[in-house]
Amino acid sequence: MNKTLLACALAAATTLAAGGAFAATIIPVNMNDPGVGLNDPTPATPVGGNPGTTVGEQRRIAYQFAADLWGAVLESDVEIRVRAQFTPLSCTATSGVLGSAGAMTVHANFPNAAATEIWYGAALANSLAGSDLGTTTDDINSNFNANLGTPGCLEGSGWYYGLDGSTPAGKINFLDVVMHEIGHGLNFQGFYTLSSGAPFNGRHDIYGTFVHDTVSGLDWVDMTNAQRQAAVTGGGLVWTGAAVTDEVPIALAPVTTLNGGGTISGQFVYGQAQFGAPATPANFSGELVLVNDGSANPTFGCVASPAGAYAGRIAVVDRGNCAFEIKVKFAEDAGATAVIVANNTTGVITMAEDPSVAATVPALSVSQADGAILKAGIPGATLALEYVPDTFAGADAEGRALMYAPAVLASGSSFSHFDTSLSPNALMEPNNTSDTDASLRLDLTPALFQDLGWTLNPGNASTNGGSCDTGIPAVEIGGLVGGANLQAADAMCRDVHGSGSAGYRSCIGPFVERLRGLGFVPRSKAAPVTLCTRR
């Protein structure tokens, strides 16, 4: 599995200082030298609503789009300056760091702070104080992997600079990664030395005040350093903020279990696929059939099986010899309604997509041991995904969102992310996933910012520099940001083509149609949206 990491970086300096807000203005600060990174002159074809004609221009446009999205979601009367640059980051042929970001300074004991002796990142501190507490430096620093897709760095991948959420198989959506990294700089991060559990310069931070450890039963800020050091790898960290907890039932799906029937019984742990239809109780149930493609390794399913061989059943195929999605596509072509991939070792896996094929049926993985149980039960074995009432994927029994605390400390990832068990996947998980679309859905992240002290934009998206009210909420419950998307697209199209021009209308049109098709522009709001995007 390709593991693409999104890291949280801290460049902190101790500062103290001295508080009607407006939509936030987030200003990217281009830190790359001429001819590289954000200034790369390599010609490029406009893609996915991004009109840039060089690689550098497309990168700058996508970054500004992300800045405008967050700006439409949050309120602040202090500008937020974000340093941006492409630079080599840690990478191998199969895994790598896509980006890193964090607050450049931290502040405490300023006017309007909710708590004393508590660190806040610069952007949030400035917003609460109503003034710039660090006038000599920018607020956030962000870096993005300049080597992505080159030999030795996630080979075969590469950045997708489109703004439409239609990321090609095998590519990484740059807009999603920028939204994630800016999110860290907006204070989705703690400032602790996790290897020792020590708080930065002896003070706790606002993020840590909302973290609780269900294993020890202690709040993060009430622990000793040794207790925090243990908790960060204990798998029991949850977020206690009321805004996030209130939205868990809206943003997260119910827990689903994979249950055996017929000749087998019990529940089976499973892994997901990064391709095909998402597996749900509606599309994943039925009798099992073992794949036999007639080859020398018939259960590997790496060549075509006879037509209709698995019609109406769930095909069980062994891992090995070819890509996961190739196996699933061959089974699908032979009539399978879903596929189970049995691992060839312990544990379950997330199955990576393969750009050479496009499977559409749902697929899950199980461990080698569980695969043996399933195969031994054929014929007569059945499987079904079923919802567990009053539970949510990625939340504890009390409905609190889980935070990332893997058994092995992951520098730059542990503690300062949501857990990977959240479903649907969340923007602020440590791994980039193909089913996130930060151009439209920010899941629980706005609610977490609200817990930290940010004010969310309670109004509608506007166009033409704020002069036209579209009637579409900028941000809605569950982190839906269709209105913010429209506002960011309007700013981009006007900047590139000028207000009221034919080029502007051609640019904004696909964004409006996408939002209309997804239900963000109901018929009752069609007229104001049309008016606001024509002049």
Image (tube, rainbow, N blue to C red):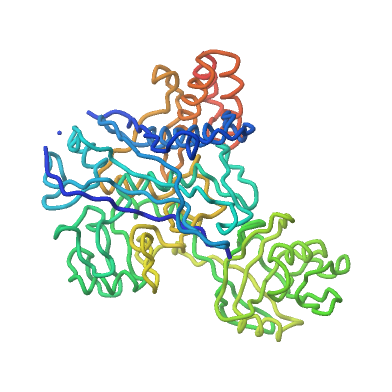
Quarter of the image holding residue 232? bottom left
Image check: 113 left or right of 504? left
Q: Look at 56% across and 29% down and name the residue there.
A: 52
Image check: 68 left or right of 452? right
Q: Look at 16% across and 52% down and name the residue there.
A: 118
Position in image of residue 63 (x %, y %):
46, 37
Position in image of residue 276 (x %, y %):
67, 57
Q: Look at 65% across and 56% down and name the residue there.
A: 277
Count of numbered labels shown in the rendering? 0
Position in image of residue 457 (x %, y %):
34, 34
Quadrant (top left/top right/bottom left/bottom right) for the N terminus: bottom right
- Give the camera-side residue of 299 and 532: 299
Position in image of residue 253 (x %, y %):
49, 57
| 405 to 191, vertically: above or below | below
- Give the camera-side residue of 458 and 297: 297
Quarter of the image holding residue 18? top left
Task: Single out the residue that lies furthest toward the front.
Answer: 34
| 457 to 314, vertically: above or below | above
